[in-house]
Image: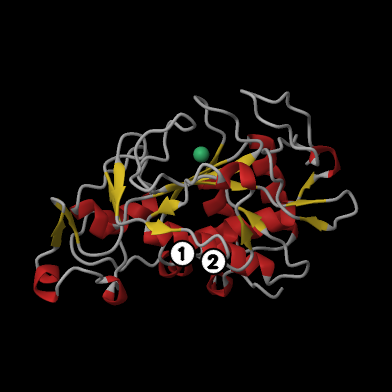
Amino acid sequence: MRASWGRRIGGCGVAALLAGCAGSNHWTDGSSVSIGRASTGGIRKPAELDVRALGLHVPRKWRARGFRFGTDELVDGIYRIAAQVSSRPGHATLGVADLSRRTGGPSQWHHSHHSGRDVDLLFYTTKADGTSLPPPEDDMIPFDGDGRPWLRPPRDGTVPEPTWGERRFDAGRNWWAVESLLSNPSLRVQWIFISEPLERRLLDYAETASRPDWLVRYAELVMLQPSDAAPHDDHFHVRVYCSRADRAYGCEDSGPIWQHEKKVYKYPGPEHYDPLAWRVERDDASAASGPDPAG
Ligand SMILES: [Zn+2]
């Protein structure tokens, strides 16, 4: 749910908005609401990812499933990554795999992705000579710690991705995607699941590129190779926290609340979350620069 939802009033009258809006027995204020937990919940009035948005592409494997729905904040955050990375030299395209179904809830493909707060993003890839490649259409491609692909036998009748062998993990652009997420003032990132060797590659890149210390440490905090799920060596899985407004409507976080979140977590009232302010306060003035899309 957004803090500013004036243009999303839709069919909900102004008087009703003041008290919330009941449609089909479901309460919302007219914007998206993530309900319950990421692994048991659902979503109301989700944002639908615009598959023609600048700098992104939903490859056919995932387009066919139609898992294009998420909270307003998450979908905006995906647009932000795509626009920022594509504005850099090479104009690379972000591959977006599954968000949630229109109503959220369970699916055969995911343990989580129920409540509009999860998205799978394909890694940016290049050829061996560094030229950027468009996202693969048919499957995710796993990479080892050297950023080289390996061939995974196709699972459950899926088509193998024919371009796997020519691809390399694009540490630079994948870092810029992480940086876009973590510097987004309206998105509160809980996890970026990724394999440990690839996390290391990203952190190494960030250090080489002299990224602000707070960003590198923040990335180190939220990037994780899950112990109870796939190692995530073939995509990012991003999980965001409930917005404050959604919590009032039944959104539930599970797992750790990071220290910097605790500062704002316990207070009721309108969202005024601003991670940049928190980080700038903590760190040196270079923190204020954030990602540089043109750099
Ligand atoms: Zn996922």
Left or right of residue 25, residue 93 in this image: right
Q: Residues within 10 Å of mark 2 (few under 14, many from 20)?
A: some
The amino acid on which the numbered mark 1 sits, given as a three-letter code, is Asp
Q: Residue 179: name its quadrant.
A: bottom right
**Residue 88, relative to residue 24: is it above or below?**
below
Residue found 71% across the figure and 35% down from its top: 142
Q: Position of residue 211 (x, y in %)?
A: 65, 63
**Residue 283, relative to residue 206: is it above or below?**
below
Q: Which residue is mark 2?
A: 80
The amino acid on which the numbered mark 2 sits, given as a three-letter code, is Arg
| Distance of label 2 from label 1 (alpha carbons) | 6 Å
Residue found 40% across the figure and 53% down from its top: 70
Tell me the quadrant of the picture where the C terminus can be found. Answer: bottom right
Residue found 51% across the figure and 65% down from its top: 283
Colouring chosen for the image of the structure = secondary structure
Question: Tags 2 and 1 in contact by the CB under 8 Å rule?
Answer: yes
